[in-house]
Amino acid sequence: MAQRKVIITCAVTGAIHTPSMSPHLPVTAQQIAEAAIGAAEAGAAIVHLHARDPETGKPDQSPEAFAPFLKVIKQRSNCVINITTGGAPTMTVEERVRPAATFKPEVASLNMGSMNFGLHPMLNRFKEFKHDWERPYLEGSRDRIFKNTFADIEYILTTCAENGTRFEIECYDIGHLYTLAHFVDRGVIKPPLFVQSVFGILGGIGPHPEDVAHMKRTADRLFGDQYRWSVLGAGRNQLPIAAMAAAMGGNVRVGLEDSLWIGPGRLAESNAQQVKLARQIIEGLGLEVATPDDAREILQLKGGDRVNF
């Protein structure tokens, strides 16, 4: 019997944390490229990418912000490149889809429902900010909905329909799985599905082991053998939930987008450091870490030679 291979996705930067929270958060195109390549060398088959303004670190969803690091990563690594369509909760869906529509990656992320996305508790931990936008951005999440309506989801799916891009389908709660089932039933999205279950974001499902099991049971019932399951745990939940998922037959996502930490009170110094710990968990369970080409086969991706960068 063939050994099961576990896909590690690394989310390199993102729209959750701000530059003042960690000196190790990649901000410039060069930093993002180096972080992604380092994560791939450590064992990540897929790198999930956002872009930032190089001066302020503010999330930037313009294709011009993505272009410099996409080309460098492709030249120096065989990893699967995954471009966000989530962007940030402050952006319109038209802004959010532009990089994926422009560059036609093998994988793009896709949020499967609107939600309260509570970042404001971070203000209890972080008091000093370097840039004017950071505090209002976090505080604003008290009264901000991360909008992903049925129309928004369909807009992203249809905008990217001819690109051959598959989706990292981000499900922050049980209802998001049913929304995905709706689009599958309509034929708007086709298997194999890559379902990324997100645990521990305030406003979404919690990080309890029962929550993890409930998410998998529901996905199993709705999608059977038509999906591949992966998880991410926010903050301190990252590695415990990765361990649970790997033991339960799933894949894992780590990275500084999801957690700045490597242990209690210890900031991760790189994305690669988190990938190495995830790899230790996977190999400690007697499992094998998937290569980029393994991931392409498992997820039936179009290949890195068919992207537009």
Image (spheres, rainbow, N blue to C red):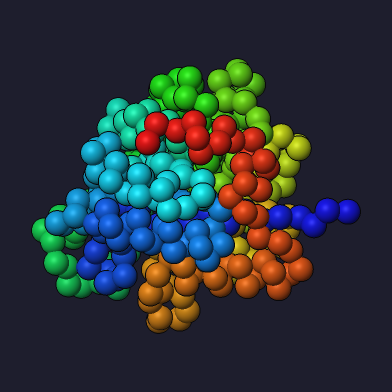
- Is 61 on the left or on the right of 293, as rendered? left
Tell me which corner region of the image, top left, top right, bottom left or bottom right, holds residue 190.
Answer: top right
Could you tell me which residue is drawn at 14 percent across and 56 percent down? 55
Q: Residue furthest left?
A: 132
Residue at the image point whose x is 22% and y is 68% from the top = 20
When asked about the image quadrant of residue 266, the answer is bottom left
Q: In which quarter of the image is the C terminus?
A: top left
Residue 300 is situated, as x and y percent measured from the top left of the image, at: 64, 35
Q: Quadrant of residue 248?
A: bottom right
Residue 140 image offset from top left, x and y in percent:
23, 51
Tally of numbered tags = 0
Q: Nearer the viewer, residue 71 or 234?
A: 71
Q: Residue farthest to the bottom?
A: 265
Question: Quick check: 18 left or right of 148?
Answer: left
Where is residue 272? Give x, y as percent.
46, 67
Which residue corresponds to the image point at 35% horizontal and 44% vertical from the top-left? Answer: 71
Q: Can residue 137 be seen in this view?
A: no
Q: In this view, does 217 lie to the left or right of 149?
A: right
Q: Can residue 52 be seen in this view?
A: yes
Say above or below: 233 vs 304: below
- Figure check: 82 above or below 244: above
**Which of 190 and 141 lies nearest the eye of the viewer?**
190
| Residue plotted at (58% across, 67% down) | 278
* Picture quarter with the N terminus: bottom right
Q: Is residue 151 above or below residue 239?
A: above
80 shown above or below 118: above
Residue furthest to the front in view is: 75
Q: Which of 132 and 116 is in front in this view?
A: 132
Expressed as whole percent of the image width and height from the top left, the position of residue 97 reads 35, 31
